[in-house]
Amino acid sequence: MARDIKIFHESLLDHLVYSLGKDVYSATARDKYTAVVLSVREHLIEKWLCTQQHHYTMDAKRVYYLSLEFLLGRLLRSYVMNLGLPADYSRSVDVLGQTYEEIVEHEWDAGLGNGGLGRLAACFLDSLATLQYPAFGYGIRYEYGIFTQKIREGHQVESPENWLRYGNPWEFPRPELLYPVRFYGRVNMVGGSSRFRMEWVDTDEVMAMAYDYPVPGYHVETVNTLRLWSARSSRDFNLSYFNSGDYLKAVEDKTNSETISKVLYPDDQTLAGKELRLKQQYFFVSATIRDILRRYRKFHGDYSELPGKVAIQLNDTHPSIAIPELMRILIDEESLGWDEAWDVTTRIFAYTNHTVLPEALESWSEGLIAYLLPRHLQIIQEIDRRFLIQVSHRFPNEPDRRDRMAVITGQGDRRVNMARLAIVGSHTVNGVSHLHTDILKQRVFGDFCDLSTEKFQNVTNGITPRRWLLEANPGLAELVTEAIGDRWLTDTEELRRLEPLAGDASFRERFQETKRENKTALSGQLEKTGLMPVPADTLLDCQIKRFHEYKRQLLNVLHVITLYNRIREGSRAEAVTPRTVLFGGKAAPGYYLCKLIIKLIHNVRDVINAHPLVREHLRVIFVPNYGVTLAQSIIPAADLSEQISTAGFEASGTGNMKFTMNGALTIGTLDGANVEIRREVGEDNFFLFGHTAREINSLGPTYNPRSYYEENRELRQALDQIAEGHFSPEDPGLFYPLVNSLLSGDHYFVMADFASYVAAQDEVGRAYRDREKWVRTAVLNVARSGMFSSDRAIREYAQKIWNLAPQPV
């Protein structure tokens, strides 16, 4: 033991001195954090290199996971845990004069994602390594991420998310891995009439440089790789401009080129924004395809075995341009015929759809693609032409199907539908919950399903229990392990063994004490940032997710206003369970209505805080700049999980799974994975409300939101207060656009579900007052959450889609 600690002490001090040039007297807190990371890397690198060498030696089939987002959160605690070294570092960092907790707090969340899409990708990387599948993640190394959210007078204000300000000791720059990525130019036909090829010429080039992150599995030797691309100019500095005194022009090419990897999801309200988004997508898939083929060609002379060695998963529509890019390389550069190239391509790609929202099923104007990627447009047009011939042959008497299934649609400035391109170019398309997959097959892509039913699969999303229970909720994790052992960390079905303990008063008491401790910790964290504390005895009601109208934060606010009215009027105050409603999430910079909802939340909070009676029963908290680290503090403390999206709009959700695994009860619609959560935990342990997806679909044509306003007194009162300035006396008309959006259209059926939601919330209040029963139900939620592990999801992908086998190192 003493020798082991001495080794860790030496490692930490050596890195402080020899890697950073500091001693314990001159080192800053960040230097000490960096020294710890560099020490942890020592335990990763040998495993990392051995993993890659093993996969090369075995010539293993690999899966390549392409995603525009990887929401990693902090890595230090997670990697130390996966390596089995938390006790060693907890004991040894005292040599630096800090505690382990103080060291961990110096890590910034990586600004590489925004919401559930990116966090799912991060959970999948963890599971791929833990299950020992050969895998790479590929994305973009955003210099500024999406944005840092600040709140000023209740308004969301965006500022750059400068997460790389101090560098990132987890990443390994690979300057030797540089790929040229081309844009613009024109296409020439080269060769005679019997054999010709297309040549893409007069292009502008941007270089893609690789940055690698190790991804260790939990208590295994496998360490996979996340490779992110950063844009570099092919012409860093124009000396002639500099010498003539035009210093800005001298670096203009470099600046313009490197904007590609600056920001996640640049605003696409302008033509320049649209062009930059498409540039980003092509930039990272072009470099990725080059890298995949380079690795394959080390052992293989032709491309006949490529589908047996490479599986590429497209995480939503963003990487769909990879399909014509691989076709371009195989046809134009490797001289394969169209049929052979198409057979190889379609056997490699698989596509995960994450949404049914039309604005997220990306489409680009044909003109923009022609301008930016002229050769790719030609290939997409040929894919479309050949596919429509296939459709006509299969459905000869249904000409309307051609329009409904065409990749390129419209008249005049036609649109290239990227979701349809992904479907046509992939061997498998999967939804991410049973309901979502059914909607894809029956409604959104029904025509494609008619053409090829077997192409469509379901793989319900999952979360890694190592991050979201072991790391996020160590108190509960310790209690679970003490009760049933630690096999649940890699086999979450083991959690079922907790079910009998829901009836054990001693276990319930310890479970409740853990929840109370988590609330106390969260409360202290909020107070440090100037926010209101969370009383330990109140119902903590949480809705933390990105802001979108379909996620219906506005419905939650209307319920808060209803509670406010009940308490201040006194008529039903005694029936209101003390409650703290916590919101967190970002609205897209151009999303006016959602930013206005954030302002409304703050104004309602201020009115509640100013009322002496109401504030004794009700609190509202908005936590700014919500991210992974904040989620790891909020979710373990939560009593109630708000999963209240309009039925049929949320593909799956993963926040709902995290809350369930941490013992929060769910109030929700039958939407996304809520359907499966309710089935697993039991109908009596889930607060259901609202119209179903089928009912919403049938309501649509005749829906009259104003009728609900006229018939429901509490709804009418809340909307009138918002419209008349009760929550904005300094600007009475401030929130009228929100009221108008509900009364004139209500595209997400807030009005239709209000009464049902309030009734379900009343049931929540009554249930929480019976604490013994509430805790019993919470324990059952944890016990029955095992299905929602990302390990289970990855096994399904490997078996049903990738045909991939583990390769233990």
Image (cartoon, rainbow, N blue to C red):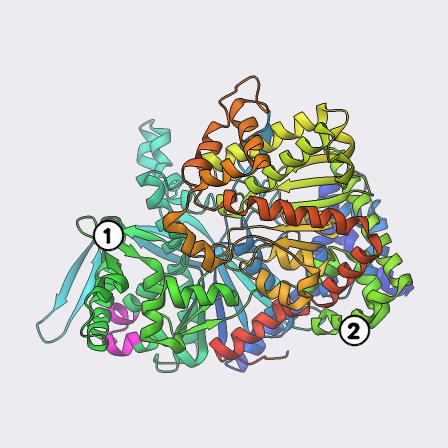
Q: Nearer the viewer, residue 754 or 216?
A: 754
The magenta span reads 330-342
Q: Is residue 661 left or right of residue 101?
A: left
Q: Residue furthest top?
A: 730
Task: Name which of mark 2 and mark 1 comes first in the sequence.
Answer: 1
**Would you place residue 348 above or below residue 659 in this image?**
below
Query: Mark 1 belongs to which amino acid?
Result: Glu
Q: Position of residue 267 (x, y in %)?
A: 41, 40
Residue in view at x 32 percent, y 51 percent: 205
Q: Can residue 54 be spotted in the picture?
A: yes
Does dot 1 land on a helix, a strand or a loop? helix
Label 2, secondary structure: give it. Answer: helix
Residue tagged 2: 497
Viewer-proximal residue among 779 and 119: 779
Residue 143 visible somewhere in the drawing: no
Q: Which residue is mark 1?
A: 366
Q: Report if residue 750 lies within the magenta region.
A: no
Quadrant location of the N terminus? Answer: bottom right
Q: Is residue 403 left or right of residue 227?
A: left
Q: Choose between 695 and 352: the one closer to the eye.
A: 695
- Give left or right: position of 624 versus 208: right
Q: Tell me if 593 is positioned left or right of 125 in this view.
A: left
Placement of 297 over or under 697, stated as above or below: below
Residue closest to the far left: 193
